[in-house]
């Protein structure tokens, strides 16, 4: 079994050999490490994608808007990801964003995971019946995604910035807090004299 370090290094070198600049290749290496750590088929997708673009280059997005369509070719998931990450603070204000015709969309996912951490919000990602919830670059929850599934093209990729809301009601919080109050200890004269700095004698 390859180590995560080996996955990072080999993915980086392969990406450079496929034509990406070293800086972007380093980002790809980190992303492949993260995808594999989360049990997602990053290496499989990257291998297929890098071989594909040697024959059929994909398109870079010049600017990300609420809806994004390539002019003629498929979007590159890596350049979509780097552009998204670089502009994530501005893109957050759009709340929801769509891309059409994205090649190997799983490779886009780690950039959105890191975006979630930067903006401090969870991000929902959907394409081709697969649903992901990205949690501050700490966890990725997936629904309907098979571990060996390869999707070479997503006709539509939907991204949504989620507002930070409690998973519990105000009443549930009040009840829990009231229970926690049972651990509070009332201050007595005895506790006051035993507390830090208490006492009349100077021992210095």
Image (spheres, rainbow, N blue to C red):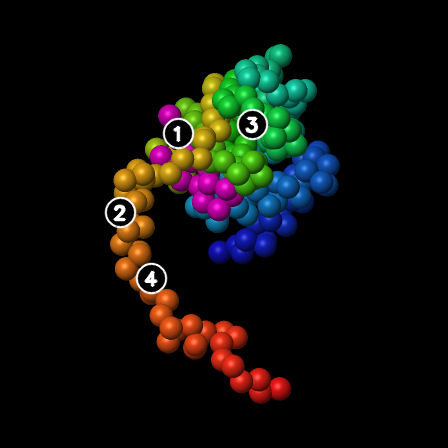
Residue underneath mark 1: 130
Q: Nearer the viewer, mark 2 or mark 1?
A: 2
Residue 38, visible in the rendered structure: yes
Q: Please tell me which of labels 2 and 3 falls first in the chain.
A: 3
Q: Please tell me which of labels 4 and 1 falls first in the chain.
A: 1
Residue underneath mark 4: 184
User: Compared with residue 192, is residue 89 higher up or lower down, i.e. above or below?
Assistant: above
Q: Please tell me which of labels 3 and 1 falls first in the chain.
A: 3
Pick the residue in front: 90 or 135: 90
Question: Where does residue 162 sit, x and y in percent of width and height?
Answer: 45, 30
Residue at the (47%, 23%) spot, across then down: 158
Residue at the (53%, 85%) spot, across then down: 201
Question: Where does residue 70 sit, x and y in percent of width and height?
Answer: 60, 15
Crowdedness near tag 1: few (<14), some (14–19) or many (≥20) residues, C-alpha within 10 Å: few
Secondary element at tag 2: helix
Quarter of the figure with residue 55: top right
Question: Where does residue 143 sit, x and y in percent of width and height?
Answer: 36, 35
Query: From mark 4 to mark 1, how far is it between C-alphas?
Result: 47 Å
In magenta segment, residue 134: yes
Residue stretch in magenta: 129-143
Q: What secondary structure characterizes most of the magenta part?
A: strand
Crowdedness near tag 2: few (<14), some (14–19) or many (≥20) residues, C-alpha within 10 Å: few
User: Compared with residue 192, is residue 145 higher up or lower down, i.e. above or below?
Assistant: above
């Amino acid at each position: 079994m390859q180590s995560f370090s080996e996955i990072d290094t080999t993915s980086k070198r392969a990406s450079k050999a496929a034509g990406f600049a070293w800086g972007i290749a380093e980002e790809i290496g980190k992303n492949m490490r993260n995808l594999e750590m989360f049990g997602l088929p990053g290496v499989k997708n990257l291998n297929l994608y890098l071989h594909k673009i040697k024959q059929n280059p994909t398109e870079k997005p010049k600017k990300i808007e609420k809806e994004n369509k390539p002019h003629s070719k498929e979007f590159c998931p890596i350049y979509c990801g780097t552009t998204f990450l670089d502009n994530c603070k501005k893109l957050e204000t759009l709340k929801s964003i769509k891309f059409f015709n994205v090649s190997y969309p799983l490779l886009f996912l780690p950039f959105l995971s890191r975006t979630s951490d930067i903006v401090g919000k969870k991000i929902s990602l959907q394409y081709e019946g697969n649903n992901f919830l990205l949690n501050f670059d700490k966890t990725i929850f997936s629904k309907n995604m098979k571990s060996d599934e390869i999707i070479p093209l997503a006709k539509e990729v939907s991204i949504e910035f989620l507002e930070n809301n409690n998973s519990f009601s105000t009443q549930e919080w009040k009840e829990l807090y009231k229970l926690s109050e049972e651990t509070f200890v009332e201050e007595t004269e005895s506790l006051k004299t035993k507390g830090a700095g208490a006492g009349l004698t100077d021992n210095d």
